[in-house]
Amino acid sequence: MNDAHNDDILERLADVLNERRHGDPDHSYVAKLHQKGLNKILEKVGEEATETILAAKDAHLGSAEKASLVSETADLWFHSLVMLSHLDISHQDVLNELARRFDVSGLEEKASRVKDH
């Protein structure tokens, strides 16, 4: 895929997720996740996060392991997008937050977060 094609991949994926959200759970994995509810979606996000971490631990070993990490990260991002969709939060909100952080150092941004403790 070229960069021009990649530029709109999140938009295209968001459109597909939105389209399938209320689809037939017997024919759509996305619809099935939404039907099962937030807890199931969060379970999948956690599962994919764990698999991503485990793949990252081996990524230094070679190209097959790096490919595995890329695949697991794609799964994590996908399920994170399903989570956001379920909560009626746009991926654009996350992109806007990342863009906002460009002008703030990581340490400043972390210090500016409200602490719950």
Image: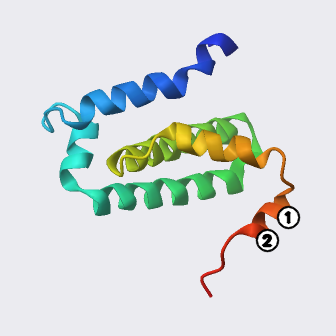
**Taking the image as drawn, is residue 2 in sight?**
no
**Taking the image as drawn, is residue 103 in sight?**
yes
3 lies above or below 105: above
**Most distant residue in the bottom direction:** 117
Residue displayed at 53% across by 57% down = 49
Kind of residue indicated by mark 1: Leu
Q: Helix or strand or loop: what does disc 2 sit on?
A: helix
111 lies above or below 71: below
Circle 2 residues within 10 Å: few <14, some 14–19, many ≥20:
few
Residue 76's mark?
none
Kind of residue indicated by mark 2: Ala
Residue displayed at 72% across by 45% down = 100
Which quarter of the rendered picture does the N terminus lie within?
top right
Residue 69, by quadrant, is top right
Circle 1 residues within 10 Å: few <14, some 14–19, many ≥20:
few
Residue displayed at 54% across by 43% down = 93
The foreground one among 47 and 37 is: 37
Q: Helix or strand or loop: what does disc 1 sit on?
A: helix
15 lies above or below 68: above
The foreground one among 107 and 78 is: 107
Residue 99, by quadrant, is top right
Question: Percent x, y for residue 47?
Answer: 44, 58
Residue displayed at 58% across by 45% down = 94
Cα–Cα span, label 1 and label 2 = 6 Å
Left or right: where 31 falls relative to 9: left
Residue 107's mark?
1
Q: State yes or no: discs 1 and 2 in contact (Cβ < 8 Å).
A: yes
Residue 111's mark?
2
Which quarter of the rendered picture does the C terminus lie within?
bottom right
Question: Percent x, y for residue 116?
Answer: 60, 82
The foreground one among 96 and 70 is: 96
